[in-house]
């Protein structure tokens, strides 16, 4: 069932509504568009140097601070200590992490013991964005009601009292509207992350799907459910669920992630490298990190399927990818295959 | 639909495909014509567009925590960006939605710059950086602004867009570049924290 959009606070009649309306009026006070336009014209005519000077000064100061930092950061033998990631690592074999599926929707969300504010900002909203881009069309249209709980269930989770938080979320989930939806979803995350109860988490997500087939969190729930199935070793069920998800609007937006997960399931759980190769190949288009991972695993699964010529060609193509993360492994594989 | 690629150099035959736009005071057809004139370089049209959208952008930036002394620069920067990339605007999103997105990015920059400036102040000056709200602000605005400061960036953006700007979940998802489901989740938590910070409970809302 679709729940209606929550009533806006400015439309409410109580103290809060009154406050919001007053604040809204006060936010719009004292704005003179004509004067601002004159300032805009003056700014537009300002030389580029003037516009960029403040930023350049800051950059120069930052660079100077970095130089000073490096100078004073030298160890006693005069060698600058490099941070850990800059130390070259030798990797003998490509690493396949068997327990970790490609799709890990829940881990993208804050762990229940940590508030949402700890989540890093979305990539596309950073300052380094070279130019503004028109917003993308969203994926969902559901607009639920938000009835806010009086008890701070997340607070219990944050304070480390996971059991109390679970009871709290169960109570919240027994209600209705967005609050109940969030309660069920948070209950699943809590059971999975804090209580180590993946099966219980799956029960909560299944209940969500039953009660809110077109709820606001449907997409996240479906992806989370898929990931849990993979985690619980129910690979065939996960494949079936991913078929349905791929055919939906949610799945088409995250097709690469889904294909990578399916490849992992075929390769690791179902021992079917030939089908894994097909999924990986589909996920390898583009230049994202997922595509990079999929391109390497495509070559690896071809090799495991016994298609050595195709594997060699795939490794070669992979090694030529700009910024290939497994370049050294791919080259080592190529060398080993040539020696055969 | 794919978003416009603004990194490409403008071409003389750039098409401006305009969707119906719900501007604050312009009818959609008028706005379409106005945008067309802007793209063709008509400065009078730019001025008209600026006058229509300046109050929207400035008030929105204030709600996102941009202070009065930072406001002018922030608004101007938003419009510099808007006009620079307007020829590439294809109307796949509403102009107003795009403006909100530019403002949100600019507000983030202002906050970061403020953090840098505060550090520099501490390094090179004994004076404490000016904090708090402007005296000219109304009491309601001060209360709301203080409560909004308690929210994280994502929650603040969603709450302001929904509660003050009246955007739909889908429109907010476009501005915040996140799924609609995330919008509702953020709104849920943002409202809770916001009400707590204001000291106004659920019972006061009915």
Image: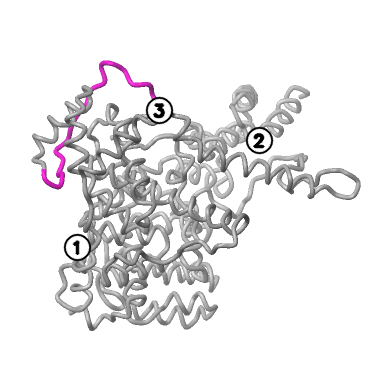
Q: What numbered label is drawn on residue B7?
A: 3
Q: Is residue B23 magenta?
A: yes
Asked whether the beta carbons under mark 2 and mark 3 sit within 8 Å of each other, the answer is: no
Label 1, secondary structure: give it. Answer: helix
Name the spot of residue A136 as percent of width and height, x first.
Answer: 31, 41
The chain letter for the residue carrying disc 3 is B
Query: How far apart in space, not on screen, are marks 1 and 2 (Cα)?
Result: 57 Å
How far, Cα to Cα, is label 2 from label 3?
Answer: 30 Å
Quarter holding the N terminus of chain A?
bottom left
**Which of the two marks, 3 or 1, is nearer to us in this view?**
1
Q: Are marks 3 and 1 on the same chain?
A: no
The answer as to whether the residues below labels 2 and 3 share one chain is no
Q: Secondary structure at mark 3?
A: loop
Tell which of B173 and A267 is nearer to you.
B173
Tell me the residue at 63%/56% (across/down). B123
Quadrant hosting residue B192 = bottom left
Residue under mark 2: which chain is it in?
A
Q: Which mark is residue A25?
A: 1
Chain for numbered disc 1 = A
Q: Secondary structure at mark 2?
A: loop
Q: Magenta span covers which residues? A: B8-25
- Residue at 63%, 50% (x, y): give it: A97
In the picture of the structure, the residue carrying the numbered disc 2 is A326
Expressed as whole percent of the image width and height from the top left, the position of residue B126 reads 59, 62
Q: Main structural element of the magenta stretch: helix, strand or loop?
A: loop
Q: Nearer the viewer, residue B138 or A96?
A: B138
């Amino acid at each position: 069932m679709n729940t209606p959009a929550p009533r806006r606070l400015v439309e409410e009649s109580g103290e809060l509504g009154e406050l919001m309306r007053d604040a809204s009026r006060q936010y719009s006070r004292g704005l003179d568009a004509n004067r601002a336009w004159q300032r805009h014209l003056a700014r537009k005519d300002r030389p580029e140097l003037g516009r960029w000077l403040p930023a350049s000064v800051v950059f120069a100061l930052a660079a100077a601070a970095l130089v000073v930092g490096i100078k004073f950061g030298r160890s006693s033998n005069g060698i600058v200590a490099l941070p850990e990631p800059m130390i070259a690592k030798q990797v003998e074999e490509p690493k396949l992490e068997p327990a970790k599926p490609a799709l890990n929707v829940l881990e993208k969300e804050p762990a229940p013991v940590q508030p949402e504010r700890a989540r890093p900002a979305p990539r596309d909203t950073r300052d380094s964005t070279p130019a503004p881009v028109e917003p993308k069309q969203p994926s969902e249209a559901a607009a639920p009601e938000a009835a806010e709980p009086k008890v701070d269930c997340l607070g219990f989770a944050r304070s480390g009292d996971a059991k109390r938080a679970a009871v709290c979320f169960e109570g919240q989930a027994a209600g209705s509207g967005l609050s109940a939806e969030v309660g069920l979803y948070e209950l699943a995350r809590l059971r999975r992350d804090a209580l180590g109860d993946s099966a219980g988490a799956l029960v909560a997500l299944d209940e969500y799907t039953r009660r809110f087939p077109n709820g606001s969190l449907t997409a996240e729930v479906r992806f989370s459910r898929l990931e849990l199935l993979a985690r619980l070793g129910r690979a065939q069920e996960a494949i079936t669920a991913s078929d349905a998800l791929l055919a939906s609007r949610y799945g088409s937006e995250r097709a690469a992630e889904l294909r990578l997960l399916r490849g992992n399931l075929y390769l690791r759980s179902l021992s079917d490298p030939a089908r894994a190769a097909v999924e990986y190949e589909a996920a390898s288009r583009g230049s994202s990190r997922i595509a990079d991972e999929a391109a390497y695993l495509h070559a690896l699964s071809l090799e495991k399927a016994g298609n050595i010529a195709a594997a060699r060609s795939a490794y070669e193509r992979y090694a030529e990818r700009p910024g290939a993360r497994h370049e050294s492994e791919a080259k080592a594989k190529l060398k080993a295959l040539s020696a055969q | 639909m794919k978003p416009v690629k603004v990194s490409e150099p403008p071409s003389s035959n750039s098409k401006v495909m305009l969707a119906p736009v719900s501007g604050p005071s312009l009818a959609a057809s008028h706005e379409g014509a106005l945008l067309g004139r802007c793209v063709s370089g008509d400065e009078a049209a730019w001025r008209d567009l600026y006058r229509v959208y300046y109050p929207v952008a400035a008030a929105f930036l204030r709600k996102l925590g941009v202070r009065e002394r930072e406001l002018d620069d922030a608004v101007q920067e938003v419009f510099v960006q808007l006009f620079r990339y307007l020829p590439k605007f294809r109307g796949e999103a509403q102009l107003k939605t795009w403006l909100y997105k530019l403002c949100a990015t600019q507000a983030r920059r202002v906050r970061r710059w403020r953090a840098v400036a505060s550090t520099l102040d501490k390094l090179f000056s004994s004076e404490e950086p000016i904090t708090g709200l402007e005296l000219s602000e109304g009491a309601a605005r001060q209360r709301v602004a203080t409560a909004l400061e308690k929210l994280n960036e994502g929650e603040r953006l969603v709450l302001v867009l929904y509660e003050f700007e009246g955007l739909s979940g889908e429109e907010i998802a476009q501005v915040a570049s996140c799924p609609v489901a995330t919008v509702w989740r953020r709104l849920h938590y943002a409202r809770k924290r916001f009400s707590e910070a204001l000291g106004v409970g659920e019972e006061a809302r009915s």
